[in-house]
């Protein structure tokens, strides 16, 4: 059973998608969230915080539907139907107003939580808003390495960390949809072919940031932080996909890590809500 965020609201069935009788529960959840986002865009029912939470819940619903077998084309069609139906809803409709209040209440609970877990097909993103270091969303990639989102400047950046203090560089390989097309749901975590990937080089290198405790020193190792453009590219990756990170050391050794995209957008939304 796929559970949405533990603080998730349960949207009323404001927008029945009637032209496709076989719409399943995950697709309906996505349609309802898309409908409410469309209504809010028109009616301005939500403040910034609840609106961000709704965006995160929508991304989570979309990822779950894709990983269950829905295609992007089907979800685009369902979203279009939902938004078209939402256009007919009056801003003062009692059901719309009640739904807005449910989202606002859900945001309060969501905002109060410090930790969250966003599961994919195989791995998950563990989020810690408070944190004992700069890491906010982490996926363990094996061999004491980790990848995810770190607090950087006034926002969050994608990063990878290795215990190798002699690591000299890191590159990230993302699927090029124009060459390979979209991924299919899989539990093998096989990254796309290098020949069909775009290459992103880490923007900065610094000592590792991971701490065992707030008062402890960071562990030995190296942290690579990627640019805002690369962070956006990773966030825009298909939630069914995986990608590869390659870390090189001064000694010439190469370490390759595989990261599952999963619900990274939802994790980002939650982690960014300080």
Image: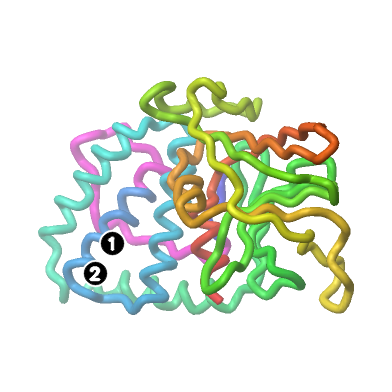
> Which residue is rendered at x = 73% and y = 49% of the image?
146
Disc 1 packing (10 Å; few <14; some 14–19; many ≥20): many
Q: Is residue 259 left or right of residue 71?
A: right
Is residue 256 a member of the stretch shown in magenta? no
Q: Which residues are magenta?
A: 6-28
Q: Which residue corresponds to mark 1?
A: 36
Is residue 9 a member of the stretch shown in magenta? yes
> Residue 187: image x %, image y %?
63, 28
> Residue 252: image x %, image y %?
81, 32
Foreground of the two, 239 or 9: 239
Q: CA distance from mark 1 to mark 2?
A: 8 Å
Q: Is residue 85 left or right of residue 25?
A: left
Magenta residues: mostly which secondary structure? loop
> Which residue is rendered at x = 41% and y = 43% of the image?
25
Q: Is residue 138 left or right of residue 249?
A: left
Element marked by disc 2: helix
Q: Does 166 sit above or below residue 251?
A: below
> Residue 165: image x %, image y %?
85, 51
When asked about the image quadrant of residue 191, the answer is top right
Q: On residue 96, which mark appears?
A: 2
> Residue 197: image x %, image y %?
50, 28
First in sequence, mark 1 or 2: give its number.
1
Foreground of the two, 42 or 178: 178
């Amino acid at each position: 059973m796929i559970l949405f965020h533990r603080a998730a609201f349960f949207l009323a069935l404001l927008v029945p998608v009637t032209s496709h009788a076989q719409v399943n529960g995950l697709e309906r959840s996505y349609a309802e969230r898309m409908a409410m986002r469309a209504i809010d865009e028109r009616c301005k029912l939500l403040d910034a915080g609840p609106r961000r939470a709704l965006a995160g819940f929508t991304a989570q619903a979309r990822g779950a539907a894709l990983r269950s077998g829905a295609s992007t084309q089907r979800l685009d069609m369902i979203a279009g139907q939902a938004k078209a139906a939402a256009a007919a809803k009056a801003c003062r409709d009692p059901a719309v107003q009640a739904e807005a209040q449910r989202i606002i209440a859900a945001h309060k609970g969501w905002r109060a939580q410090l930790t969250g877990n966003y599961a994919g097909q195989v791995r998950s993103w563990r989020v810690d808003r408070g944190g004992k270091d700069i890491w906010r969303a982490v996926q363990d990639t094996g061999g004491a390495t980790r990848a995810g989102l770190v607090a950087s400047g006034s926002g969050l950046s994608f990063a990878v960390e290795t215990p190798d203090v002699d690591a000299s560089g890191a590159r990230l390989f993302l699927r090029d949809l124009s060459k390979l097309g979209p991924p299919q749901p899989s539990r093998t975590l096989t990254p796309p072919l290098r020949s069909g990937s775009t290459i992103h080089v880490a923007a900065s290198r610094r000592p590792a940031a991971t701490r065992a405790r707030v008062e402890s020193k960071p562990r030995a190792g190296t942290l690579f932080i990627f640019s805002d453009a690369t962070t956006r590219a990773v966030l825009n990756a298909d939630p069914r996909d995986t990608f590869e990170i390659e870390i090189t050391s001064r000694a010439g050794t190469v370490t390759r890590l595989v990261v599952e995209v999963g619900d990274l957008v939802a994790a980002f939304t939650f982690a960014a809500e300080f």
